Image (tube, rainbow, N blue to C red):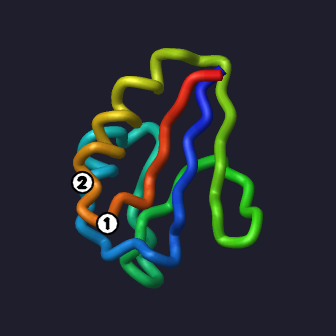
């Protein structure tokens, strides 16, 4: 299982995550910050848990590219 977490409040809107993992991220038209698609919010941490291991690599690339380090990607 792949777990991806985004701390949305700290997002600066650089768009790297959307470029690297467009199936999981998109930019909000309201505030210009990243949105983790199909995620649940728990105290500002937006998380998805997926059995699709194919999302791991693009999300890991997004994590590494994020200049404010607000994305975590791990396999459980």
Looking at this view, is 13 or 44 the one in front?
A: 44
Identify the residue under disc 2.
16
Q: Residue at x 27, y 40 (%)?
A: 20
Q: Residue at x 27, y 43 (%)?
A: 64
Total numbered labels placed on residues in the image = 2
Q: Against 4, is 54 above or below?
A: above
Q: Residue at x 40, y 36 (%)?
A: 59
Give how far apart the Cα atoms at labels 2 and 1 are.
11 Å
Front: mark 2 or 1: 1
Looking at this view, is 43 or 55 the one in front?
A: 43
* Element on which disc 2 rests: helix
Identify the residue under disc 1.
68
Q: Quadrant of residue 15?
A: bottom left
Q: Residue at x 65, y 27 (%)?
A: 50
x%, y% of residue 42? 76, 63
Callout 2–callout 1 Cβ contact below 8 Å:
no
Image quarter where the N terminus lies is top right
Q: Quadrant of residue 58?
A: top left
Q: Against 61, is 6 above or below?
A: below
Q: Residues within 10 Å of mark 2 (few under 14, many from 20)?
A: some
x%, y% of residue 63? 35, 45
Image quarter where the C terminus lies is top right
């Amino acid at each position: 299982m792949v777990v991806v977490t985004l701390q949305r409040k700290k997002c600066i809107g650089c768009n790297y995550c959307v470029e690297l993992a467009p199936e999981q991220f998109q930019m909000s038209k309201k505030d210009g910050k990243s949105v983790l698609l199909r995620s649940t919010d728990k105290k500002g941490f937006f998380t998805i848990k997926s059995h699709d291991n194919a999302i791991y690599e693009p999300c890991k690339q997004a994590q590494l590219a994020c200049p404010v380090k607000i994305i975590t990607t791990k396999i459980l």
